[in-house]
Amino acid sequence: MKKFFPYLMLLFSLLFMGCPYGSEVAIDDGKTKIDDKLLGKWESKSSSDYDYIVSKLDDSSYKIEKKPRGEGDVTVYFGFLSTVGATKFLNVWEEQNSTRTYYFYKMDISSSGAKLTVSPVTDNIKEKFESSIELKSFFEKNKDLSFFYSKEDEVYFRAD
């Protein structure tokens, strides 16, 4: 049994990894003005496989392109910021299906605009929300709890 234990731990860690929490409703109506510090090219601290290009879609929305540095397809996401208390969240979706699913990330950008820390909201949330008001209230109650976010923050550095 001892020699199978490491394999069991690997299996469990793979089973419990996942995407951030997804919802069919966003935190709010997406009317927060874009933050110009987010625009530009970003690279992940943990991986050099992709570049992320953030551009302005309109006054309150972003287009986010995940471009492989080698061969491969570009993945396009869209997003907007929501403010809950003093905390900024990015609502992100991918235009693929007729039903939109929003994923949520807490965002902290350095005052210089050179470093972006993104904390995915945990996928352990089982609640479903019928309205943005309900979802925003839930975020307001839980946003300061450490277990509201995935264990690993994603850190990006400006690359342009």
Image (cartoon, rainbow, N blue to C red):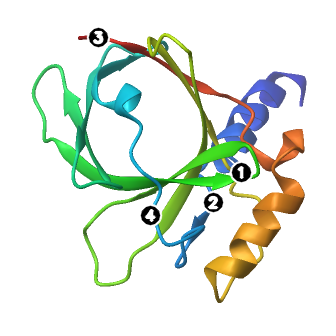
Q: Position of residue 9 (x, y in %)?
A: 78, 33
Graded by Cα atoms within 10 Å as few (under 14), some (14 to 19) or many (20 or more), the crowding at tag 1 reads many
Say above or below: 48 vs 103: above
Q: Which mark is residue 159?
A: 3
Of labels 2 and 1, earlier in sequence is 2
Q: Which residue is mark 2?
A: 21
Q: Would you say 82 lies left or right of 56 here?
A: right
Kind of residue at disc 1? Thr
Q: Which residue is mark 4?
A: 31
Q: What is the spatial separation of the Cα atoms under label 3 and label 1, in whole angstroms?
A: 28 Å
Kind of residue at disc 2? Tyr
Residue at the location (28% across, 77% down)? 97
Kind of residue at disc 3? Ala
Q: What is the spatial separation of the Cα atoms under label 2 and label 1, in whole angstroms?
A: 6 Å
Q: Position of residue 114 (x, y in %)?
A: 44, 11
Q: What is the spatial separation of the Cα atoms under label 2 and label 4, in whole angstroms?
A: 22 Å
Do the numbered discs 2 and 1 sit on residues whose CB atoms are within 8 Å?
Answer: yes
Do the numbered discs 3 and 2 sit on residues whose CB atoms are within 8 Å?
Answer: no
Q: Nearer the viewer, mark 3 or mark 1?
A: 3
Q: Which mark is residue 122?
A: 1
Determine whether the residue tagged by mark 1 lies in a helix, strand or loop: loop
Q: Quadrant of residue 74?
A: top left
151, 71: nearer the viewer: 151
Q: What is the spatial separation of the Cα atoms under label 3 and label 2, in whole angstroms?
A: 28 Å
Q: Would you say 91 lies left or right of 159 here?
A: right
Determine whether the residue tagged by mark 2 lies in a helix, strand or loop: loop
Q: Position of residue 50 (x, y in %)?
A: 28, 24
Q: Position of residue 151 (x, y in %)?
A: 75, 33
Of labels 3 and 1, earlier in sequence is 1
Residue at the location (77% across, 37% down)? 8
Of labels 2 and 4, earlier in sequence is 2
Of labels 4 and 3, earlier in sequence is 4
